[in-house]
Amino acid sequence: MAVKKKKKSVKSKRNYRKEYDNYHSSEKQKKNRTSRNAARRKAKKSGKNVAGKDVTHKDGNPRNNKASNLGVASKSKNRSYARTKSARKKNPRS
């Protein structure tokens, strides 16, 4: 019997600077982040308990801050749904 050796995978270090430059610093992402922060303030102001939780956009669009589109969910629940390439929820009712 031949003994198979497991190959060790080598992870490269994550380059946060490059990630920021290529993604987070784009105007589109800055606007999305601003809108997410505004949604959190709006939910908190309306009396929802957002401590330790995420404010979720039911339709997946971070710029849609209508009260009917906002909800509060645990971080694991809000970040676990499948997304399409356009970053929308596959099932917006989930």
Image (cartoon, helix red, strand yellow):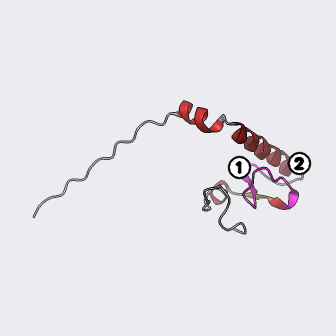
- In the figure, is residue 69 to the left or right of 12? right
- In the figure, is residue 15 to the left or right of 35? left
Residue lying at 14% horizontally and 58% vertically, measured from the top left = 3
Q: Quadrant of residue 23?
A: top right
Q: How crowded is mark 1: few (under 14 residues within 10 Å), some or many (20 or more)?
A: few
The mark that comes first in sequence, 2 or 1, is 2
- Residue 6 placement (x, y as % from top left): 25, 53
Residue lying at 56% horizontally and 30% vertically, measured from the top left = 17
Highlighted magenta segment, given as a residue range: 49-68
Marker disc for residue 45: 2
Residue lying at 89% horizontally and 52% vertically, measured from the top left = 46
Residue lying at 71% horizontally and 41% vertically, measured from the top left = 28
The secondary structure that most of the magenta stretch takes on is loop
From the image, which quarter does the N terminus lie in? bottom left
Identify the secondary structure beneath mark 1: loop
Which residue is at the front of the view, 55 or 82? 82
- Residue 27 placement (x, y as % from top left): 72, 37
Q: Name the residue under label 1.
A: 52
Does the stretch in magenta take in 56?
A: yes
Residue type, label 1? Gly
Residue type, label 2? Lys
- Residue 34 placement (x, y as % from top left): 78, 40
- Residue 39 placement (x, y as % from top left): 81, 48
In whole angstroms, how far apart are the C-alphas of marks 2 and 1?
16 Å
Does the stretch in magenta take in 70?
A: no
Q: How crowded is mark 2: few (under 14 residues within 10 Å), some or many (20 or more)?
A: few
Identify the secondary structure beneath mark 2: helix
